Image (cartoon, rainbow, N blue to C red):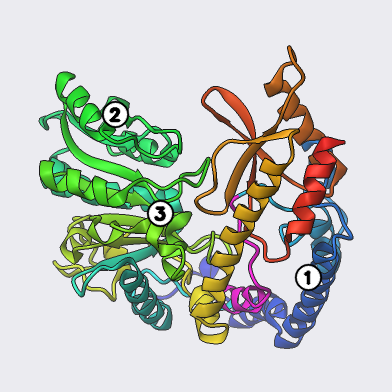
């Protein structure tokens, strides 16, 4: 059948279209743009690490929005101009005064690595899409499993963040403990279940239970002690509370570095309890898992090798750029059974082979999350990451000593990781919580530091998270001086 003239395609016109588009792909233009980007980032790093710019841009959401016009109607700009404006308005996480959020300060080598990964743009969900990234991920997951103490039967997957990691782990728990028919039939006929969870657990674990159809009622909080770790005997109390509500306990979620205080639950005691009652043990080690790299601090995670699953963020204490989370399982069969699907265009096999990550996680289009971590280990070495963990943990203890030495301040609890919660003492009769909020706002607006706050036990505390190798004890003394003034 001949093509009608109305729909005929002029090959010459198509070639001209292609040529116009390919101007944006010119390798020489790319080299020039990359050099400009490297220059802009170099200047940003130099100014940030020397504390020659504010940590935070100190602007309102409205003013920031006004500074960034609609890109389709604004005057054209060159790439260097856009990047400079972006960096000027960004939070400077490499600044030694950035001690607020649980966000890493990646070594600059992450930049060239991200450049390569972004331009190549392979999808690491299937081997055919990203053969190198899939093989790298296999090696990295095996290394992390060894660090966790899992045996040869362990397995894991890299995914985009701790929230997705928690959802993956608890989905595997649902398959194992609530019933394999849940994937096919839902939970309409399932017995109501309970997940016993530290009252200090990150909200993503509670959210995962709701998303999985278990309901918010399923989450039974476990009381904590003065260290903000699970109190002795509290698991048994929560278990009996769940039973009294007509719920069948199926799992325990324990912290290896809680978000608010960095405190660690007794994982050995939690594992004993789970073994006694046939419960799944999931450990949220998103923040504290990297202590497994330290000979001095890994004792805080003793017992994690008995957990059924764990989440460990490389984009926190392993300095990786966002996002890179490992979901690890003591038994490979649990990960294999998590997703029960086939898609002939992607994953047609009945099993879930290691080289087809799409059959084992939520993501189908998956970036090469593994490349920055693999490249860091190959170039800087595991010892570099271990030293970073130990420096941050040591610095937190030294800062806590400084807080305790100054009568104007009080410490919430001795730090178990790199998180320190403290507050300025208020005058008699004054509103101490309002004082902390005013101090935080004043300090952040001054631009020399960026700190956070948290509410614990009904009171407001200032919260410092030490993740930046550029932050020294002298900087933290300056922070206390500024808060005193």
Which residue in the structure is indicated by mark 3?
A: 285
Q: Is residue 334 above or below residue 375?
A: above
Residue 41's mark?
1
Q: Earlier in the sequence, mark 1 or mark 3?
A: 1
Tell me what residue is drawn at x 63 percent, y 32 percent.
461
| 3D distance between C-alphas at marks 1 and 3 | 32 Å
Q: Is residue 259 above or below residue 384?
A: above
Instruction: Tell me the element at label 2.
Output: strand
Q: Is residue 362 above or below residue 450?
A: below
- Name the residue at the top extreme: 429
Residue 220's mark?
2
- The magenta segment: 102-118
Residue 313 visible? The answer is yes
Asked which quadrant contains residue 342, the reply is bottom left
Q: Give coordinates of residue 322: x percent, y percent.
A: 56, 60
Asked which quadrant contains residue 225, the reply is top left
| 3D distance between C-alphas at marks 2 and 1 | 47 Å
């Amino acid at each position: 059948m001949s093509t009608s003239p109305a729909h005929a395609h002029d090959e010459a016109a198509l070639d001209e279209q292609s040529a116009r588009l390919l101007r944006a792909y010119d390798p020489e233009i790319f080299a020039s743009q990359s050099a400009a980007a490297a220059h802009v980032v170099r200047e940003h790093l130099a100014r940030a690490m020397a504390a020659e710019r504010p940590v935070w841009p100190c602007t309102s959401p409205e003013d920031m929005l006004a500074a960034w016009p609609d890109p389709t109607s604004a005057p054209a700009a060159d790439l260097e101009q856009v990047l400079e404006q972006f960096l000027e308005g960004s939070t400077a996480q490499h600044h030694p005064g950035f001690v607020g959020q649980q966000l890493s300060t990646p070594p600059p080598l992450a930049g060239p690595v991200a450049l390569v990964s972004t331009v190549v743009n392979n999808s690491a969900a299937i081997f055919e899409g990203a053969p190198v990234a899939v093989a790298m991920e296999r090696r990295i997951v095996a290394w992390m499993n060894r660090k966790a103490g899992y045996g040869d039967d362990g397995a894991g997957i890299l995914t985009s963040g701790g929230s997705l990691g928690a959802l993956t782990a608890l989905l595997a728990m649902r398959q194992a403990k609530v019933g394999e028919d849940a994937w096919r039939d839902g939970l309409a006929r399932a017995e109501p279940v309970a997940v016993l969870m530290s009252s200090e657990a990150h909200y993503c674990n509670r959210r995962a239970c709701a998303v999985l159809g278990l309901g918010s009622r399923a989450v039974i909080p476990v009381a904590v002690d003065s260290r903000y770790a699970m109190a002795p005997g509290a698991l048994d109390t929560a278990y009996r509370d769940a039973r009294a509500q007509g719920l069948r306990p199926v799992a325990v979620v324990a912290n290896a570095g809680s978000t608010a205080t960095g405190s660690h639950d007794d994982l050995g005691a939690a594992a004993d309890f789970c073994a006694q009652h046939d419960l799944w043990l999931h450990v949220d080690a998103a923040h504290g898992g990297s202590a497994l790299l330290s000979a001095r601090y890994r004792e805080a995670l003793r017992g994690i090798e008995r957990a059924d699953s764990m989440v460990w963020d490389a984009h926190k204490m392993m300095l990786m750029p966002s996002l890179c989370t490992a979901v690890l399982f003591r038994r490979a069969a649990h990960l294999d059974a998590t997703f029960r699907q086939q898609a002939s265009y992607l994953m047609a096999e009945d099993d879930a082979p290691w080289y087809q990550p799409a059959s084992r996680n939520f993501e189908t289009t998956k970036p090469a999350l593994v490349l920055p971590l693999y490249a860091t280990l190959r170039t800087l070495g595991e010892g570099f990451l271990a030293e970073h963990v130990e420096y941050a943990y040591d610095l937190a203890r030294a800062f806590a000593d400084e807080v305790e030495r100054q009568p104007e301040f009080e410490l919430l609890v001795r730090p178990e990781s790199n998180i320190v919660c403290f507050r300025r003492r208020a005058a008699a009769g004054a509103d101490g919580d309002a004082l902390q909020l005013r101090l935080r706002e004043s300090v952040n607006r001054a631009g020399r530091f960026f700190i956070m706050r948290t509410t614990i036990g009904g009171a407001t505390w200032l919260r410092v998270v030490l993740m930046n190798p550029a932050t020294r004890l002298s900087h933290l003394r300056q922070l206390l001086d500024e808060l005193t003034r």
